[in-house]
Amino acid sequence: MGTKFPLTGWSSVAIHGGHQAEPRHAHLTPIYASSTYVFDSAEQGMNRFTGKEPGYIYGRFGNPTITEAEEKIAALETFGLPIEAKAILHASGMAALSTLFLSNLKAGEKILTHFSLYGGTEELIHRVLKDLQIETIITDLHNLQQAESILQNDPAIRMVYLETPANPTLQCVDLEALISLAKKYGKKVACDNTFATPYLQQPFAFGADFIMHSTTKFLNGHGTAIGGVLIGTDLEFMKTTATKKHRLLGANSNPFDAFLLIQGMKTLEVRMERHCHNAMEVANYLDGHPAVAKVNYTGLHHHPHQAIALKQMRHPGAMLSFELKKGLEGGMEFLNRLQMCVRAVSLGTCDTLLSHPASTTHVGVPREERMKYGITDGLIRMSVGMESIQDILQDLEQALATQ
């Protein structure tokens, strides 16, 4: 089925979006394992290099398998919206972030963002962008009056960067309010949509300029490939400035990982439905457990950002974190007792993954900083999988028994 058919269902787009008829009639887009592409003539080669004629040139510049993955993601992020977007697939989420920042910012310009970012993002802005004289202002973006004051009084701010839900505290920021505020002062807005996926949240619906994902996570869904994507609504910018930076940074994906991503995205809706159902059950269980001091999940009525999440998300999602009363010692003991659930970083796979941010994903963040963000020594992050819910709960129960 070609993509010109008027697809009206989310899963239909996830399965058929971006797919073009394959010349040799293969059912699925093949893995185009070629580093370079031939030209019919010298003139055609010149026209492709100058942009006068579309077509593939070199694997770092593009590949048919990669193109399908890009177009499918763009279709999902714009589904139901009266806008177009272009996606650029990267070797990792960090590569996508690098293209985002380096194609939009130069020395002397600033980013405005909030507390509790993914540890890799945190290190990138402090260890790389800072050396390039690109400064980051971190503040509480739930205080809209304060955010406006900063935007109003600091013309060097070029971009507002949002991560919602945030990793690993699950705090949410108000996309509609913050994007409106940023636009009032002429700022670009980028949003990390990795935790939510386009099935649960579409930042473009609120006016975001850019969306990024670590495609390694829920989009792939099976833990089989690393990847990242940057999607933008300014098509000219994405085709020129962003594409040039992406190519020069050598941040390209590869055909095999793109193929795995395409297959994973086809089941995104059904996977997210099961993930989300299980996560709600787990959150309610942990919320009543005597060994647990706190559960971070926006589906719980006492979470301070529940109203924000309900306004902009289809469901609170598949991610949660919880703090054990016994702190670091309790966290290590708990992880060591798990029998079915998996001790691993990353997230979004079919199996349930648990990690200890203080010693893994946020180990590079100074303790006083992560404590300020709510990333305590005893915090456990949980990517709730698709196993039978009774088995997930039984494993948690026995692992918590000695707390």
Image (tube, helix red, strand yellow):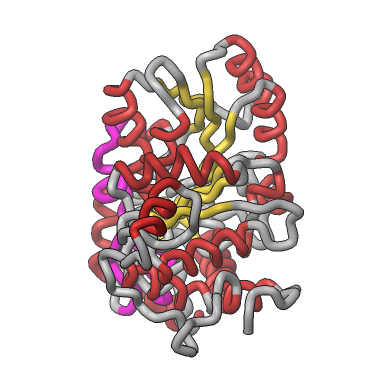
**Res 11 → quadrant:** bottom right
What residue lies at 65% left-to-right and 28% top-to-bottom?
182
Give percent across and percent down for residue 377.
31, 44
Question: Which residue is drawn at the image coordinates 62% and 19% (left, top)?
Answer: 146
| Placement of 138 over or under 28, stated as above or below | above
Which contiguous range is marked in magenta?
A: 340-369
Q: Nearer the viewer, residue 368 or 157?
A: 157
78 with respect to 240 (left or right): right
Residue 375 vertical placement versus 128 (above, below): below
Query: Is residue 13 visible in the rendered structure shown here?
Result: yes
Assess whether residue 76 is covered by the magenta stretch: no
Image quarter where the C terminus lies is bottom left
Foreground: 252 or 276? Answer: 252
Main SS of the magenta part reads loop
Q: Quadrant of residue 149?
A: top right
Residue 41 in the image: state x and y as whole percent.
Answer: 36, 63
Q: Dividing the image into 4 quarters, which one contains the N terminus?
A: bottom right
**Residue 221, quarter of the rendered image:** bottom left
Residue 227 in view of the camera: no
Q: Is residue 345 magenta?
A: yes
Q: How many marks?
A: 0
Residue 85, percent across and down? 61, 52
The residue sitting at 65% across, 24% down in the picture is 186
Relative vertical location of residue 283 with respect to residue 174 in this rendering, above or below: below
Horizontal placement of 334 versus 299: left or right? left
* Residue nearer the viewer, 328 or 134: 134
From the top left corner, tell me how far across and down residue 350 is, in percent: 42, 76
15 left or right, relative to 215 = right
Q: Name the residue at 68% across, 28% down.
A: 183
